[in-house]
Amino acid sequence: RKRILITGGAGFVGSHLVDRLMLDGHEVSVADNFFTGRKRNVEQWVGHENFELINHDIVNPLYIEVDEVYHLASPASPPHYMYNPVKTIKTNTMGTINMLGLGKRVGAKVLIASTSEVYGDPEVHPQPESYWGHVNPIGPRACYDEGKRVAEALGYAYAKQENVDVRVARIFNTYGPRMHMNDGRVVSNFILQSLQNETITIYGSGKQTRSFQYVSDLVDGLIALMNSNFTEPVNLGNPEEHTIEEFAYLIRDLVGNTNSEVEHLDPMEDDPQKRRPDISRAQKVLKWKPVVPLKDGLQKTIEYFRKELLRSS
Amino acid sequence: RKRILITGGAGFVGSHLVDRLMLDGHEVSVADNFFTGRKRNVEQWVGHENFELINHDIVNPLYIEVDEVYHLASPASPPHYMYNPVKTIKTNTMGTINMLGLGKRVGAKVLIASTSEVYGDPEVHPQPESYWGHVNPIGPRACYDEGKRVAEALGYAYAKQENVDVRVARIFNTYGPRMHMNDGRVVSNFILQSLQNETITIYGSGKQTRSFQYVSDLVDGLIALMNSNFTEPVNLGNPEEHTIEEFAYLIRDLVGNTNSEVEHLDPMEDDPQKRRPDISRAQKVLKWKPVVPLKDGLQKTIEYFRKELLRSS
Ligand SMILES: NC(=O)c1ccc[n+]([C@@H]2O[C@H](COP(=O)([O-])OP(=O)(O)OC[C@H]3O[C@@H](n4cnc5c(N)ncnc54)[C@H](O)[C@@H]3O)[C@@H](O)[C@H]2O)c1
Ligand SMILES: NC(=O)c1ccc[n+]([C@@H]2O[C@H](COP(=O)([O-])OP(=O)(O)OC[C@H]3O[C@@H](n4cnc5c(N)ncnc54)[C@H](O)[C@@H]3O)[C@@H](O)[C@H]2O)c1
Ligand SMILES: O=c1ccn([C@@H]2O[C@H](COP(=O)(O)OP(=O)(O)O)[C@@H](O)[C@H]2O)c(=O)[nH]1
Ligand SMILES: O=c1ccn([C@@H]2O[C@H](COP(=O)(O)OP(=O)(O)O)[C@@H](O)[C@H]2O)c(=O)[nH]1
Ligand SMILES: O=c1ccn([C@@H]2O[C@H](COP(=O)(O)OP(=O)(O)O)[C@@H](O)[C@H]2O)c(=O)[nH]1
Ligand SMILES: O=c1ccn([C@@H]2O[C@H](COP(=O)(O)OP(=O)(O)O)[C@@H](O)[C@H]2O)c(=O)[nH]1
C-alpha cells in the first residue's frame, strides 16, 4: 500500500487513474485547480478514508509526504492550452519544478505525463522515442509542446543531479468517458455533433491522421511504467491509425445518426499531419500493449456522452 | 535617455553592452549573480551616477522601474550550462518569467537573448529563422537548448496575451575580450592552449563547423533589434563558416606558436555538426551585418588573453 499523489487527478485521465489506484487499495491524494477537471469525476471517492482532494494550483509549492507522484496537471486540448498560453507554460515549467522538488525532498518517484506533441508535426513515421521531433518553437502550439519538452528535460536534470527517480510517459491521443464536453478534441466534438444532429466539423482536408487509445489502456500503461525500473521516455498509445475523415464517418455510423452532415473548415495552424506511436519499447520493457478495440471504446464513450446530454438537459 | 536593465550584465556579452549603452548616456542597471560574470568586467562604471550593479539571482523576482530589459542572464558555454542543468533550466524558465512579468508591470520592452542552439544539430544549412530545429529534448544539451526554446515561447505568450513588447535575438557563436578563461568554449580554449604551449584539443574529427562573430558586431545587432519595431526572432551572427580544425590552425598561427600540438579527443555527445546563420532577415529589417574581420577580432582577443595570463601569474 502506497501513498500516491495525482496532480490533475480530477481531469479525464487522472480520474480513471484514481479509480484504479483506489481499487488497488492505495492512499490517493489529488491536487487539482479545477481548470478543466471536475469534482464530479472523483465524487465516488469523496469521503473514503484513503482519499483526499486538494484544491491546489500546481504552480505553487505543495508540501505533502508521498511515495509516488503521477504528475498530470496541465491543460491538454488545443483550445484549452491556447486559451492562456502563459499559464500553460507556467504549469508545465513551475508546476513540474515543484513536483520534482517534492520528489527530491521526500524521495518519491515522479512520473511526468508528457505527450506525442513533443514530436510536433513529425517527419518520421511512426514515431519512436529516439525521434527528436519537429516542433515550431514560436507557433500557437508552442506553449504546450515546448512546455512539455522542457518538462522532460527538467525530469532528467533532476534525475541526474538530484537522483530523483523519474518516469516519462509520452501519451498519444486518448479518449473515453469523462472527456470534457467543451474540450474541443476531435472525438468529443464528433460524438457530440453526431448526437445533437449538428454538422461534423473537419479542420482542413481530413487526410491528417491520428491513432487513438482507450483510456483504460493508458491507465494500465501508466501504472506499468511507474512500477518498472525503466527511466527513459516510453510512448503509450494505440498504433491503429485513421484519417480524421474516417473518424468522422465511423463515429457518425456508431452513433447511428445519418442526419449530421460532414463539413470541412479551415485547417488548424501547425496541425500535425500524421501521428502513430511506435510502441516496441513499451511492449518490450513494460510487456504492455493496448487491448481495447476502437469500436468498443467508442461505444462506451458515446454512451457516456448520451447520458451527459440527458443529465444536462 | 532611457533606463535600461541588463540581466547577466557582468558577463562577456553583457559587459560590452553595458559599455556601449553607458557611452550613449543611458541609465544602466545590471542584475547578475556572478555565476560566470565578474565585477571586474564592469568595474570601469562602478561609482558612475548612471550605473548600478545589483547582486541578484534572476530566478527570484526583481522589482525595478525601467524602459528596456536586455535579458542575457544564463550560463552560456556547454561546460557551464551542464554543470548544474537544473539551475540552467530554472534560470531560463523562472528567470524569463520574472523578466516578462516585469515587462508586463512596467511596460518595458524585453529583449530575450536566445541562441542558435534552438536549431540544435541542424538538418537545414545555413539556418534561417523559419527553421524549426533539430534538438534532442533529453540529451546533455537539453537543459540549455530546451530552456531557450521555451524562453522564446514564453516571450511570445506574454506578447500575445499581456501585450509585452518582445524582441528575440538568436545569437550565434560570439568571441572577444572578457570571455571567461575557464569557459571551455572553443575560441578561449584554443587561444589559451596556444599561448601556454599546451596541446590544442579538438573534440571529434574537427570537421564540424561554426561561424564566429566578434562581440562588437553582436552589440550593434542587439541594440538595433531593441530599437526596431520587429518582433519576430532575428539571427545575429557572422556567416563566415570554418571547420573547428581550421580554427585550431588559424589561432595557433595568429598566436605565433608552432609548439602546440593538435590532438583529437572524443567527440561531444549531440555536438552540432554544422552551424551558419542565414542573416537575410537582420540585413533587411535591421540594416545590420557584421563588419569585423575574423583575424582582427581574433588578434584583439589574443591580446586580451595574453594580458590576463600576465595579470594572473
Ligand atoms: N488525453 C490525451 O489525449 C492526452 C494526450 C497526451 C498527453 N496528455 C496529458 O495527460 C495529462 C492529463 O490530460 P487529460 O486528457 O486528462 O486532460 P484534462 O484537461 O482532463 O486534465 C488535466 C487536469 O489538470 C488540471 N490542471 C490544469 N492546470 C492545473 C494547475 N495549474 N494546477 C493544478 N491542476 C491543473 C485540470 O483541472 C484537469 O483536472 C495532461 O498532462 C496532458 O498533457 C493527454
Ligand atoms: N557568447 C555566445 O557565443 C552566445 C551564443 C548564443 C547565445 N548567447 C547568450 O547570450 C547571453 C550572454 O552570454 P555570454 O556569452 O555573455 O555568457 P556569460 O557566461 O559570460 O554571461 C552570462 C551572465 O549571466 C549571469 N547569470 C547566469 N545565471 C544567472 C542567474 N540565475 N541570475 C543572474 N545572473 C545570472 C552570469 O553570472 C554571467 O554574468 C546568454 O543568455 C547566452 O545564452 C551567447
Ligand atoms: O515538498 C516540496 C519540496 C519542494 N517544492 C518546491 O519545489 C521547487 C524546486 O525544489 P528545489 O529543491 O529544486 O529548489 P530549491 O528549494 O533548492 O530552490 C521549490 O521551489 C519548492 O518550493 C515543493 O513544492 N514541495
Ligand atoms: O472538431 C474537430 C476537432 C479536431 N479536428 C482535427 O482532429 C485532429 C485531432 O485533434 P485534437 O484536438 O483531438 O488533438 P491533437 O492530436 O491535435 O492534439 C486534428 O487534426 C484536428 O485538426 C477536427 O478535424 N475537427
Ligand atoms: O516587476 C516585476 C513584476 C513581476 N515579477 C515577477 O514576474 C513573475 C511573472 O509575472 P506575472 O504577472 O505573469 O505573474 P503573476 O504575478 O500574475 O503570477 C511573477 O512571479 C513576479 O514575481 C518581477 O520579477 N518583477
Ligand atoms: O576545446 C574545445 C572546445 C570546443 N571544441 C568544439 O568546438 C565547437 C564549438 O564549441 P563551443 O563549446 O565553443 O560552442 P557550441 O557552439 O558547441 O555551443 C564544438 O564542435 C566543440 O566540440 C573543440 O573541438 N575543442
Image (spheres, coloured by chain):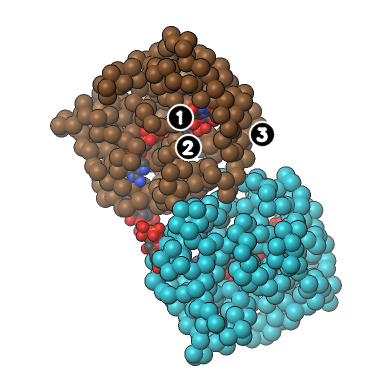
Chain colours: A brown, B cyan
- The amino acid type of the residue labelled 3 equals Glu
Residue situated in front as seen by the camera: B25 or B131: B25
Q: Are marks 2 and 3 in contact (CB under 8 Å)?
A: no
Estimate the spatial distance between the alpha carbons at disc 3 and disc 1, rounded to whole Å.
Answer: 23 Å
Q: Residue A4: in sight, yes or no?
A: no
Neighbor class of circle 1 (other Cα within 10 Å; few <14, some 14-19, many 20+) is: some
Check mark 1 vs ligand 4: CB closer than 8 Å? yes or no: yes
Please give the chain letter of the residue carrying mark 3: A
Ligand 4 within 8 angstroms of badge 2 C-beta: yes
Residue beneath disc 2: A78
Whether residue A245 is visible here, answered yes or no, is yes
Residue located 30% across and 25% down the image: A20
Q: Nearer the viewer, residue A250 or A33?
A: A250
Residue, disc 1: A185
Foreground mark, 3 or 1? 1
Q: CA distance from mark 2 to mark 1?
A: 7 Å
Up the image or down, B14 lies above or below B164; here it is below
Marks 2 and 1 in Cβ contact (< 8 Å): yes
Task: Name which residue type carries label 1.
Answer: Arg
Residue B292 vs A112, above or below: the answer is below
- State the image coordinates of residue A186 (x, y, percent, origin top left): 48, 26
Q: Position of residue A223 (x, y in %)?
A: 38, 29
Residue that carries the numbered disc 3 in the rendered image: A123
As helix, strand or loop, the secondary structure at mark 2 comes to helix
